[in-house]
Image (cartoon, rainbow, N blue to C red):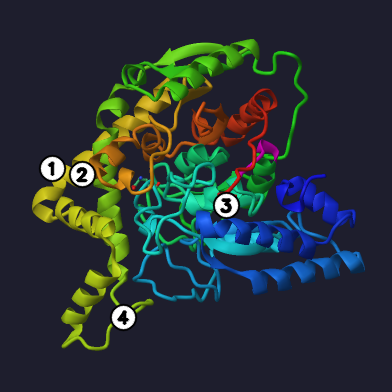
Amino acid sequence: MMELYELGVREIVEGIREKRFSALEVFDECLGRALACEGKVSALITATADTGRAHARQIDGYVAKGEPLGPLAGVPVILKDNICTHGIRTTAGSRILGRWAPPYSATVWDLLSSAGAVLLGKSNMDEFAMGNTCGTSAFGPTANPWDVSRVPGGSSGGSAASVAAGYVPFALGSDTGGSIRQPASYCGIFGLKPTYGLVSRYGLIAYGSSLDQIGPFTRSVEDMELIMHVLARHDPKDSTSVDKSEIDFTRRESKGEKPLKGKRVALVKEFQDFTLDPPIADAIKRLIRIFEEMGAEIAQVSLPTVARYAVACYYAIAASEAHTNLARFDGVRYGYTVTTAAGLRDMFEEVRSKGFGAEVKSRIIAGTCLTEPVRSEEYYVAATRVRTLIAEEFRKAFENVDCILQPVTPSLPGKIGESDEDAMKGYESDLYTLPVNMAGLPGFSFCTGYSDSGLPVGLQLVGPRWSDKNLLNMGFELEKVLGAPKIARGGN
Ligand code: GLN
């Protein structure tokens, strides 16, 4: 017998409709699982037990009365803590937001709650989504539920860890340069960074506005399609949102023995010169064979500008946008403030000195320098020009292939504390994820299996703009061969 917390989105929705169990039972089992793991994993900043239970009871009321139910009725969810939830503390992993409770909700949370999803908590993250370990959070680190001495990845590490450990069947994160795909890979689950513009970012606390995108974590591809079906909606409140209602995420065509016949899957020529941890290199070789067996043709594309300049350009652009976006945290409008300062200027200085952590400060300082009038042409503007070349390089590559198969990270998750020591190494490890954001493309991270040491080994599929559903279709076929991600022990 499976425990209720082990069920996926579709199974929960069906079970509640068929009255095999109630929404409250599901919620309480998931909450129980979360509490059993939290001591070791620390994936949550806030647990929303009371409001969640009330919402679950309300869903059970609809079931009892035979009223229509939303497509996610009774499914528990965790949101990254940079996604605004009306009346519920939202911190972005920072001290500067203090106990700030937003007066409005992000569109994604409006969509999910109208579909019947029930909030279980807000997850830990690198401060303002800057980092790739969860180690820059003002609330302390989160642990990888597969090995609690290791990092879960970041910045959406809490969301990934909570899905991997079975707190919830799905969670949302945000991805500016890899923050969904990298923790999904470290925690052994599915993570999708949708095409820029497909999912509304209204109510997401902005980091790099031209790069940020919200997306889901799940333990099955089918569940991911159910979530995307709810989230991929045009939002007039987000000027970058695009109407793509023609994409039907729930459509499934029955495929024969060679389900990927006619598909061309490419490897990146330049990436083959870089070293990978052996389990990741082996996974690529194995996946090539699997793709071939499924009828796909393996090709090669060349992305020289990406390989050489993407990391430097990304960090220049992300820091420049971050310094603008974070200017609003001044102690007047949000959360943390001081009352002892001599004047306004002193107050700004004190609030920002005490409220922001070291990584955020270094990005704000870098962004301030890079965009200074005397320097911006040479740095910020130059980086945006290279970005155009990067997008063009991908566009050309996708004239001949359907998707690219590539690593998510060069290595498996490191020990907590260790990976924070060498910031530059951390930045470079983002090479495989951040070009995808620079070009606004979809990237899909999936678990290929486990290393001898029991750590998940993830890889990534990248496609042209709006090919999100195609990536998931391939993911669906891969899941049949590779098996669904398992639930981690979560320190138990
Ligand atoms: N690690 C990258 C950064 O720190 C990406 C983070 C993200 O995607 N939010 O900027």
Q: Residues within 10 Å of mark 3 (few under 14, many from 20)?
A: many
Tag 2 or tag 3, which sits nearer the N-term? 3
Residue at the extreme front = 492
Number of numbered discs present? 4
Q: CA distance from mark 2 to mark 1?
A: 6 Å
Picture quarter containing residue 467? top right
Residue 20 spot, x, y in % from top left:
89, 54
> As displayed, is residue 101 above or below residue 171?
below
Residue name at image x 63 percent, y 63 percent: 120
Residue 259 location (% of width, % of height): 69, 18
**First reached walking from the N terminus: tag 3 or tag 1:** 3
Whether 443 is drawn above or below 244: the answer is above
Does label 1 or label 4 sit earlier along the sequence?
4
Label 4, on which residue?
A: 337
Q: CA distance from mark 3 to mark 4?
A: 31 Å
Q: Is residue 131 above or below residue 26?
A: above
Amino acid marked by disc 1: Glu
CA separation in Å, label 2 and label 4: 35 Å
Measured Cα–Cα span from mark 3 to mark 1: 43 Å
Residue assigned mark 1: 378
**Range shown magenta:** 218-222
* Rendered location of residue 224, percent (x, y): 64, 42
Q: Look at the image and tell me whether residue 280 can be seen.
A: yes
Q: Is residue 291 left or right of residue 463?
A: right
Q: Residues within 10 Å of mark 2 (few under 14, many from 20)?
A: some
The residue tagged 3 is: 162
| Amino acid type shown at disc 4 | Thr
Label 1 sits on a secondary structure element that is helix
SS for dot 4: loop
